[in-house]
Image: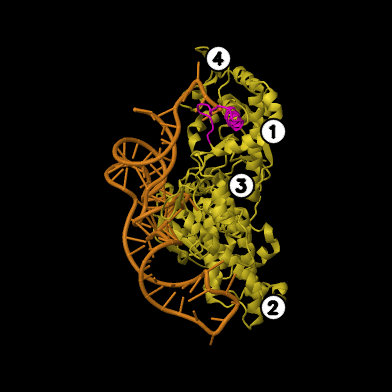
Chain colours: A yellow, B orange
Amino acid sequence: MREPRANPPAGPGRFKAGKVGEMERALSCTVRSAVAKACREERLPPAAAEAFEELGPAHLEVPRDRSKGDFATTAALRLAGPCGMPPRRIAEELEAGLDLSGLPVVRTEVAGPGFLNFHLAPGWLNDVVADIRRQGSAYGRSDLGRGVRVQVEFVSANPTGPLGVVNARAAAVGDTLASLLEATGFDVEREYYINDAGSQIDKLGRSVEARWLELQGLEASVPEGGYQGEYIIDIARAYEAERGEWARAADGEERVRDMARFAVERMVKTHREQLAEFGVEFDVWFSQARLMETGAVERTLADLEARGHTYRKDGAVWLRTTAFGDDKDRVLVKSDGEPTYVLPDIAYHRDKFSRGFRHVIDLLGPDHHGYVARLKAAVQALGYPEDALEILIVQVVRLVEGGRPARMSKRRGQIVPMEDLVEKVGRDAARFFFLMRSQDSHLDFDIDLARHRTADNPVYYVQYAHARISSILRQPEAAADVRAGAGPDELALLLEPSELALIRKLADLPEEVAGAALAREPHRLTRYAIELATAFHKFYDECRVLVDDRPLRRARLALADATRITLANVLALCGVSAPERM
RNA sequence: GCGCCUAUAGCUCAGUGGAUAGAGCACCGGCCUCCGGAGCCGGGAGCGCAGGUUCGAGUCCUGCUAGGCGCACCA
């Protein structure tokens, strides 16, 4: 038996998840038989069967223009080369040999350069409405991940200052990516790495000390490269209240260490609270300082040396990262005997894999992309496969307000605090907007739009659809029929174009979830949510739900309810609320 | 100088090698005897440039141009 892959392929080469995927599988089988048959009957050369096998499921697709059919195969186009025949000829041969028994196919046709299109009976998907209502909050999940353990590490902001908007973006993206992977059947842990060791922490301690001395009325200034923000003064004040007496009697260096420890604790606590407020909870908060206490750095260095990937030059210890694709070798231990920042990070990743994760995903900020090659090289030097570590870059956020880039805080320091943004636009809008763009592209965050409580704001547009459905389901005359549900005969009554389009959209959820998870593209979810809401609004506009005709009313109520469930599930993955009233 | 990312509609962005390249915003014009009008319908224009691979390229490869970011025995 083949081992489940830690990161199955995202693109063609696999069947889709859900009901649509089942139909793809069935049609693919049919096409395959048709190829085999044509070969047996020598209407196609033997090479065709072989070439077809290499294609895998990729030959089946859903035409962009649905009027062309519900599915299409490009097999004939792809076999044209190997067969040495015109594609349309091949398509005709395949069509002639199709065995469609047991399939809801009403028509096939050869079209364009050699597509073979399948038109299905209009109601072929209607029973997903009942499926969705049965599955409830589980609808959309699949088991492609087979329980493989995956870690997603994200945010991991330095505990030396407040969280910025990029951290907020990373929080939204990382959390939703983790949720997507869970929904696709992976065993996921969310981890936050606390950089609570090293020279930055020392600087933090010295910055607090300077402010604290100033509070005593003494002459002092924040050291070169120290932290200037006003929050340092807040920390110094809090420190004075709790530890002031001790500090005045303490030795200078010991005091700096104590202040650093105090500041880190306080900072991390604030970060944790803000993230929780934002709907993001981590399974593990991993301390660099504690890792280093265990001797992990030394063991990692010894491991790398034992594996023969290090050498000495100019009094320093180097790691031969160029052997694994980096553009230059990296220093692990400086000539003064101190480790560089890389070594603890390598030790950290070694620790991750030693905890049993088959696949590790890091979300890094835009300033770290130069760092990807060396980290991936180091992981390989430790003997792990090249794709065991996956690094995604979360790009910068530019806030736009009043049509121009905004500066939201008068606080000193460059970053705009996450707090201010969330306070301004709300958690739902912030999370949704962060998910509207691919994480590796720069994001213009339109604050005015995010605050609109109207349809031009996508998050309200989607939430409104949910509230509107909830309102219908609340109607007194609906109650009994919502409970009764709709059987196959009733669901078969759903044949209006807007009903069929809505059902088709509902049926796409499992594949949207799996696709977004495997491609690491959480932004697809928001797009899907908007499309689903659009399909619903269109249905609502064209079809009255609470009609007198009882069977039809039951069917439409079931459809509305299935839409409500699907919207709620998508929004849950996004970390956005699904209100019943607005 | 080297490396990474980006280049699609006026703006912000989607677009898994397939048929006539999509959405939102902005702009203009329609639709409320009815389940929430926070809704629906209609209206324009576009793949930076030049080659290449392919039956087929916005998508893959090379070069160029223009933006963004990164290049330490700093973290």
The image quarter in which residue B6 lies: top left
Whether the residues at callouts 4 and 1 have beta carbons within 8 Å, the answer is no
The residue lying at 69 percent from left, 36 percent from top is: A241
Foreground label between 4 and 1: 4
Q: Which residue is mark 4?
A: A336
Q: Choose the circle earlier in sequence order: 1 or 3.
A: 3
**What is the distance, in whole Å, between disc 1 and disc 2 at their CAs?**
54 Å
Helix, strand or loop status at disc 3? helix
Helix, strand or loop status at disc 4? loop
**What is the distance, in whole Å, between disc 2 and disc 4 at their CAs?**
78 Å
Mark sitting on residue A355: 1
The residue lying at 64 percent from left, 34 percent from top is: A264
Q: Given the image, on which type of amino acid does mark 3 rest?
A: Asp
> Crowding near pointer 1: few (<14 within 10 Å), some, many (20+)?
few
Chain of the residue on which disc 2 is drawn:
A
**What is the distance, in whole Å, between disc 3 and disc 2 at their CAs?**
39 Å
Give the image location of residue A169, x and y in percent. 54, 46
Helix, strand or loop status at disc 2? loop
Q: Choose the circle earlier in sequence order: 3 or 2.
A: 3
Q: Considering the image in quadrants, where does the N terminus of chain A appear?
A: top right
Q: Which residue is mark 3?
A: A175
The image quarter in which residue A532 lies: bottom right
Q: Choose the circle earlier in sequence order: 2 or 4.
A: 4
